Structure formats: structure tokens, C-alpha cells
Image (cartoon, grey):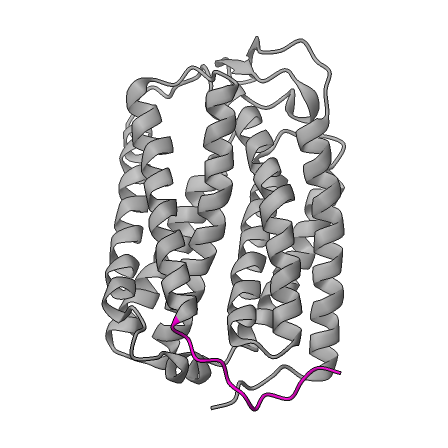
Amino acid sequence: MPISPPAPAHERSLRLLVAGIAALATVATAVGVFSTGGTGPREVTTIGGRVVDLYGTGLYRDDTWLIGAGNRGTDAATLFLEIPLLLVSLVWFRRGSLRGHLLLTGALAWFLYYYASMSLATAYNGLYLVYLATFSLSFFAFVLAFTSLDAEAVHVARSPRFPRKALGVYLFVVPALLTFAWLPALVGEAFGAETRDLVERYTSDVTSMLDLGIIVPSLVLAAVAYRRRTPLGSKLGVFLVLFNLAIGVALLGQGIAQLVEDVPLTAGEKVGYIGSFAVLTLVSVVLSVAVLRTLDEPTDRPQTP
């Protein structure tokens, strides 16, 4: 069955949006990775009277130690892996590839997620307008890519070797793990438990908002629809595993940077957060490869001139 391609005007718009995202993200991540200066970690007291250690180096000198080092690692992963993936997937998409369309949608979801976080959670710096513009372009590009992705085409493209059971289990397990990772601490804080002021946030926790408010419900919706064997379930399921792959790659970069920068994490935190996300990323890699290899490409989609 052929994919229903987006209207030519929409495809041209998507092409321009992706080019803008790639250009802006390249500037933002390159500055984030290679900027220098500052005195290193320093202790400050926030307006709320909390004592935190700031990163003190480069673009992220005014972010907490954990966030500043993590942003630098995420920028490196985005610069060297996510941006090339975005551009390669756009080329495949323009050739009429269903796999390319899915990869493009997953990559755009990552840029939307990351630059929402950078716009809302990162301490204000000279690149704020770049973050804002990248977020805006990513939002509209994602909407175009996702809405033009034919759920029925994804559903019928699954070959007999498609990992149906593995994907179904994944869609139920990941939201449970994300909920377990974030919710206990948030509930504890709501009842007065102390947070780790040394290295963590000193503003609102945007990451948990995005994960618990958007990603977890999306995964649950996908799991239910997939269990019912609907085309929407296939579309959401494949898209979300590719999106999680993109997140996982960035999280690996983040975790490595935090270890290299010697952020004072306990052994339990290193295993519980960095280690568990590394395992989850590995699972996403294996499942993504299996999913993409077992999707049959349509042969009758018109080629983009």
C-alpha cells in the first residue's frame, strides 16, 4: 500500500523547516560544547535561600553543576549524532522511504523535546533566542511530519518478521520505568522531603514535566492502541521507539559528560540513573534496528522531483 505523501507545498515547507532546525541547532550545540571561560563550580544562594553549586564554565556557567555538565554532553550528542540523523532521514524521506519518514518524525520529536527543555529550564544565556527559534521550527516541522505519516501504511508494512511482541512489551514497560524514575521523588518533595541542592535544579523541573506530562501518556496511549492491533497503535509504537532511541543517545552523552566532569553523584545515582538509561538506550537501539529492518518499503510512492 502506498504512503499518502504530504502535499508538495507541505513537503517544501518541511524541507525548509528542517534546514532551519539543523542550522540553528548546529550553532547552539557548537557553542555549548566548545565555549570556555569561567572559574569552575561555585557555590551560590538562590533567591529562595537554597544553596546550590553552579557549573561555572562556558555557556552553561550559570546552570547547576549537574545540568551544566549534562547540557554540554547532550549538545555533543546532538551535534555529532542527532543533527546528521535529522538530515539523513530527510534525504530518505524525500526519496519516498517509509523508514525515512519514521526516522525524520522521531528525530524532529527529539529536537522539539530538547529545545523545549533548553528554552524553559536552562539558565538564561545569549543563545536564548536560538533555543526559542529552534523550538518553534521543531514544533511545526514535527506536526507536518507526524500528521502526514499514514498510520495504515505503517500497519500494513510490517513484515512477518516484525517484532510485534517485543514492541508491545516495550510500550508497556517504558512508561512504567519513567514513572518510577520521576514520581517518587516528586511526591516526596511535595510532602517536604529535601532535594539535593548541591547539583540539581534550582528552578522548576521541566524534564519530569515533559516525561510525565507528555511522553508517559503517549506511550500508554500507544500501548493500548497497539494491543488492540489498530493502525494508530502501529504508527505510534514505531514512532515512539525511534523517538526514545534519539532521547537515549542524547542521555548517554549527558551521562558521560557528568561522569567526566566529576559531578558529585552517589554510586546509587550513577547506577540508578546513568546506568539504567544506558540499558534502556541499548534496548531501544536493538528494537529500533529490528523494527526498521522488518518494515516493507512501498514501491509506488511518487518520487519527489
Q: Where is residue 72, by image quadrant?
A: top right
Residue at 30% in and 52% down: 175
Give the image location of residue 120, x and y in percent: 59, 40
Chain part drawn in magenta: 294-305
For the stretch drawn in magenta, what is the main secondary structure? loop
Q: Residue at x 51, y 42 (%)?
A: 250
Does residue 192 sit above or below 278 in this rendering? above
The vertical placement of 275 against 114, above or below, is above
**Residue shown at 48% from the left, 29% from the top:** 256
Image quarter hosting the C terminus = bottom right
Instruction: Count numbered badges in the picture.
Output: 0
Nearer to the camera, 200 or 171: 171
The percent coordinates of residue 52 (x first, y second) are 50, 14
Instruction: Work out whether residue 241 or residue 224 is closer to the camera in this orientation and state it.
Output: 241
Q: Is residue 138 above or below residue 10?
A: above
| 70 lies above or below 147 | above
- Give the side of residue 260 with respect to residue 235, left or right: right
Does the segment drawn in magenta span residue 263?
no
Q: Nearer the viewer, residue 202 or 294?
A: 294
Does the magenta-highlighted stretch encompass residue 297?
Answer: yes
